[in-house]
Image: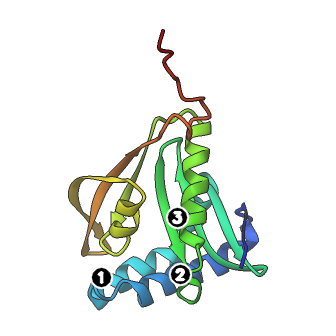
Amino acid sequence: MTVSLRPFLPADLPRLAAVFRASIEELTSEDYNESQQGAWAALADEDEFATRLASDLTLVALLQGDIAGFASLRGQDHIRMLYVDPQAVGQGIATTLCDALEKLAAARGATKLSVDASDTARNFFEKRGYQSLHRQTVDCFGEWLGNTAMEKRLAANDLGQTPQTSAVH
């Protein structure tokens, strides 16, 4: 199945909040307890959630015309959110979204891209070439959530540059 991307529209907010909550509740149970998941999922109930989606460059992934995930780029070089509907996991949604964010970051002049990866998402980012910088914890409504600050250097090809070759004389 083909994944298509489009920009976030305000009308997407209820569906993106549902994807956000479902992704946390159904995909992170091996790494976070119920209290942590509940606090994290509650971020979708805040006005700030809509503000974050609108202020970042937010892409929506569609699978057969239905919203299957979303991702956002804050500034030119930080992935703030990457969430996939649990029913669409394994169909290339996260990969397609991350590929697009890496290209957009490069187009914005970034030479590296950072992410604060949840324990659940860390392996995904490692497989994409992101390096762990340090562990950190975030206070979320009184619950402490661990994640890993990660970074990937964007290759010359990602930056739209032609690789330099040296001539041998």
Q: Which of pointers 3 and 1 lies earlier in the amino acid sequence? A: 1
Q: Residue at x 50, y 66 (%)?
A: 82
**Residue of label 1:** 36
The label nearer to you, 2 versus 3, is 2
Where is residue 21? Give x, y as percent: 50, 83
Secondary structure of residue under mark 1? helix
Residue 26 visible? The answer is yes
| 60 left or right of 142 in image | right
C-alpha span from label 2 to label 1: 25 Å
Q: Which mark is residue 48?
A: 3
Residue 52 visible? The answer is no
| 99 left or right of 114 in image | right
How dense is the environment of label 2, judged by Cα within 10 Å: few (below 14), some, or many (20 and up)? few
- Inspect the image, locate mark 3, and give the three-letter code of the amino acid beneath it: Glu
Secondary structure of residue under mark 3? helix
Q: Residue at x 59, y 30 (%)?
A: 161
How dense is the environment of label 3, judged by Cα within 10 Å: few (below 14), some, or many (20 and up)? few
Where is residue 7? Give x, y as percent: 72, 59
Secondary structure of residue under mark 2? loop
How dense is the environment of label 1, judged by Cα within 10 Å: few (below 14), some, or many (20 and up)? many
Q: Which mark is residue 90?
A: 2
- Inspect the image, locate mark 1, and give the three-letter code of the amino acid beneath it: Gln
